[in-house]
Amino acid sequence: MMKWVLFSPELYYVVMAAVFFFMSLERQAEPRKLYKWAVILSGVGVLATVLGARLQGTLFFDAYRIDLFSQVFKILIAIGTFWVMLVCSELKGVDERRHAEFYFLMTICTLAMMMLVSAVELLTIYITLELSSYSLFLLVPMRKHDGEYAETGIKYFMIGATASAMMLFGLSYLYGVTHTTYVAEVVKALPRVFNQPAAVLGLVLALAGFLFKQALFPFHIWAPDVYQGSTNQVAAYIATGSKMAAAAMVIRFIGFGNADSGYFVQLLMVLSVLSMTFGNLVAIIQKDIKRLLAYSSIAHAGYMLIGILTMTEQGYASAIYYALAYLIMNFACFMVIIKVADDGHNLQIKELAGLHKRSPLLAMTLMLGLFGLAGIPPTVGFTGKFLVFAAALKKGYLILVIIGMVNATLSLYYYLIVIKAAYLLKPVREYLPVRVDGVTRSLSIALVVLMICVGIFPDRFMQLTEAAAAALLM
Amino acid sequence: MNSLSTYLILAAMLFCLGLLGVLQRRNLIGMLIAIELMLGGASINFMAFNRFLAPEPAVGQIITLFVMGIAAAEAAIGLSIILALFRQMRSINVERAQRLSG
């Protein structure tokens, strides 16, 4: 087999980015035409990643590893991108002349995240991480009439650039104490040198970059502002696609470890507890639904970390399953937000009032998505939480599981506030009826079916995630 | 003077100054320069480890080259965002840009 076949899904996205680049050079590009192209091309992209699911091998002097784990996450990222492109039909938040650039940056970001999940070498990780961050740095301030939210972009940029500089400095120490840049060898050499302060400092600083991407506790501050200040579609993309890549990277980095490095696990535990508790407590008082989802995403990153820090195959499998569940549920919520606020403004919770009359289908999608996020059976979110907590219990982390459970109950409160708004509240003034086109209708039906089916019959997906976790540890 | 620790201390000082600058500065350009200082510290680390300890001769140098390229891209993106912000607020002071409460 030719080596380049291994790289074919990424190559496809390079071509797709080139198409949008040339379209952005045109003087007059029509938004409808661009939207059609974006949907078709990203749909084919999903197909390309699915076809590449069974590929295996290494590329570029072993700096780039293709196994079932990376391919599963590539499929998740491609699906997330495809869904976000589907809801771009009313891209009112972005100036019409910039639509081509918008799609171009989205594609580049997708490409970078796909490369990130395959990267197993420090320099490769750094470059792909920066590439995906830079495209997001540019996508966030693209919002039209952004007087109110002008500072979002610069805040995101400053926090992101600082976190990545800290990560690079940490990586330099890791390189210094282990004399190699391959993650597998770095992590293998770490237990030997763990008594050196440089190794510990390097690891902690290197984690900063990963924590920033996943919006975990000390680096979460950007999430609420960025969700609120960016276009609804970009927020949806950050919440779904970008989250997947970050989760994959953390799993990959820790998955190589496999060593009983006690302090490190304790550090991760503290971070996970802080993320969960902080996210859930602050989410309660939010009025803007995107800010609410941002704080809930901080909490969910904490839940996911519980599965990862068990450092067992079962734990990794549960974390991958949780990532899949999170992608579906979170996107369902964002799709409803984008459709209800189709002129691109920021949706307040009270504006959802009477949604079940205005659009029953969207209201049901929103309800199931929020139930899933809260972890109520029979949705996919319940199964995800169950698997994560089961993996942690098996390892004997009882207190961690109890804190997680308490947090899940806390989170139910603010999810129910949103559901109450959609189903029980009477609207204080007339809102325009929600326009639901064919694409949205079929997409929401598909999401509802997915949320319930994957939740009730998780067997096939669990087999897939377990195989992916096994491939990770191979 | 030709020892590893000299370079490591220099790099750590650069990094700490950069971090302090990011946290202390109220001027966006100043913050950007401070981030470049942090990256510079990391680059010195890579070069020093490469020069004194590395089994493979070129890895650290290659990383430093890449970091220089990436830092240039970062500065370009950062300055363009700052410029866009300046057009709206007529200021590049962070205190003027605090309408969202993170």
Image: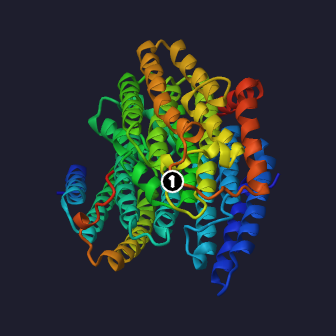
- Quarter occupied by residue A39: bottom right
Question: Which residue position holds label 1?
Answer: A347
Nearer to me, A296 or A165: A296
Q: Secondary structure at mark 1?
A: loop
- Taking depth in this image into account, of A207 and A195 the one nearest to the observer is A207
| Circle 1: residue type | Leu
The reply, left or right, for residue A360 in relation to residue B20 is: right
Quadrant for the C terminus of chain A in the image: top right
Q: Nearer the viewer, residue A23 or A121?
A: A23
Quick check: A444 left or right of A192?
right
Q: Looking at the picture, how far across and down is residue A295, in whole percent?
A: 43, 41
What residue lies at 54% left-to-right and 47% top-to-bottom? A427
Q: Image height check: is B1 above or below A53?
A: below
Tell me: A473 left or right of A301: right
- Where does residue A112 sit, x and y in percent of width and height? 58, 57
Label 1 packing within 10 angstroms: few (<14), some (14-19), many (20+): many
